[in-house]
Image (tube, rainbow, N blue to C red):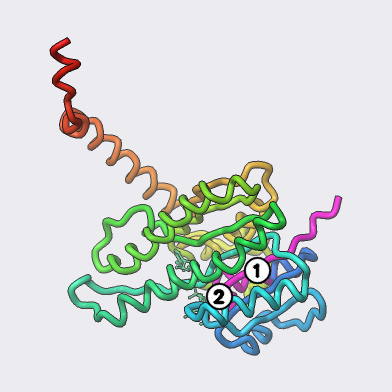
Amino acid sequence: MNTEKIWLVTGASTGLGLVLVKMLLDRGHKVAATARDGDALLEAVGAKLEGQFLPLSVDLADERNVRRAVDATMAAFGRVDVVVNHAGDALQGSLDSLSDDALRGTFDINVFGMLNVIRAVLPRMRTQRSGHVFNISSILGFDGGHAEWGAYSAAKFAVSGLTEALAAEASAWGVRVSLVYPGAMRAVPDRGDAPELAARDPLLQASGGDPVKAAQALISAAQAQYAPLHLFLGRDAFDQARGKIQSVQQELARWREMSVSIGFVDERRLAA
Ligand SMILES: NC(=O)c1ccc[n+]([C@@H]2O[C@H](COP(=O)([O-])OP(=O)(O)OC[C@H]3O[C@@H](n4cnc5c(N)ncnc54)[C@H](OP(=O)(O)O)[C@@H]3O)[C@@H](O)[C@H]2O)c1
């Protein structure tokens, strides 16, 4: 069975994106990947891989730039099977301390950049009647109760909301959508793609999620018969999600009477 797929990964110059691209190439997939500096990306990936790897210089906040990148991917590989909207940028600071520019900047890359990619790729997937979109949110896009992280959290909640809607829209065309919530991940420079190493490294296991294992999880989810809509990555993400769900369930139960009490009452039906 031919399991080779065409992947498009955004923000692949560092972190999880870079690890993922290297792992995909190693497994024989074809990969188009973006960073603002395509040459630096090529250097980071460390291989020419003619015909298998397409590094693209893209500012994701620029819609025309993004459309050109998707056109180039189609021209090189003929289709796109899996898109990983990985690019993102964290912003820390209390809500009243951050400038308008900083707030809009975080939405530009985390939300509008992602929407640019979705708008460029989805029509292709609709025509193909297949595809899988992974949108990388954050556990802070599910559990927003963290001081100093409100702006980033708001942007990632936007990612979560738009992704749930996308899943509802795209399922009609056979396109799968997964919303990924990583917890804290360690930066792993030059780790290559040796997952066994990660499993044996006690330091890596002790603090933060391992991007190598996260990349493996994405590939496994792409191959799964039923794709997850909500995928939490990391023990911290899992525990935080469970805590948030439990506290919302408790409040739902405690305030149920008031919640359901505000509907209109049909006086005529009551009188009948
Ligand atoms: N690291 C964590 O602990 C963590 C936790 C939860 C969620 N996440 C999410 O996971 C994803 C990756 O995180 P990471 O820590 O691996 O990120 P990272 O190493 O900081 O990589 C982010 C990527 O985004 C790209 N990027 C940033 N601004 C861009 C722009 N304006 N236009 C185009 N590309 C841009 C960068 O590419 P260039 O700068 O080369 O263009 C880079 O390749 C992000 O969405 C992040 O929010 C991370």
Q: Is residue 159 visible to the viewer in this orientation of the structure?
A: yes
Residue 142, percent from left and from top: 37, 53
For marks 2 and 1, give the one nearer the viewer.
1
Instruction: List the single residue furthest toward the right.
Output: 1
Report the label total.
2
Figure quadrant of residue 52: bottom right
Q: Is residue 83 left or right of residue 154?
A: right
Q: Is residue 237 above or below residue 8?
A: above
Q: Is residue 177 above or below residue 74?
A: above
Question: In front: 44, or 180?
Answer: 180
Instruction: List the single residue furthest toward the top.
Output: 272
Q: Residues within 10 Å of mark 1 (few under 14, many from 20)?
A: many
Q: Residue at x 18, y 30 (%)?
A: 264
Which element carries disc 2, helix, strand or loop?
Answer: loop
- What amino acid is found at the position of numbered circle 2 in the picture? Gly
Figure quadrant of residue 6: bottom right
Question: In front: 266, or 247?
Answer: 266
Asked if the residue at label 2 sits under 8 Å from ligand 1, the reply is yes
- Reading the image, the residue beneath label 2 is 11
Q: Is residue 125 left or right of residue 256?
A: right
**Magenta stretch encompasses residue 8:** yes
Q: CA distance from mark 2 to mark 1?
A: 10 Å
Residue 250, percent from left and from top: 25, 35
Which element carries disc 1, helix, strand or loop?
Answer: strand
Q: Is residue 200 visible to the viewer in this orientation of the structure?
A: no
Q: Residue at x 60, y 61 (%)?
A: 122
- Reading the image, the residue beneath label 1 is 8
Quarter of the image where the C terminus is located: top left
- What amino acid is found at the position of numbered circle 1 in the picture? Leu
Q: Residue at x 43, y 68 (%)?
A: 111
Residue 159, percent from left and from top: 43, 60
Q: Which residues are magenta?
A: 1-21
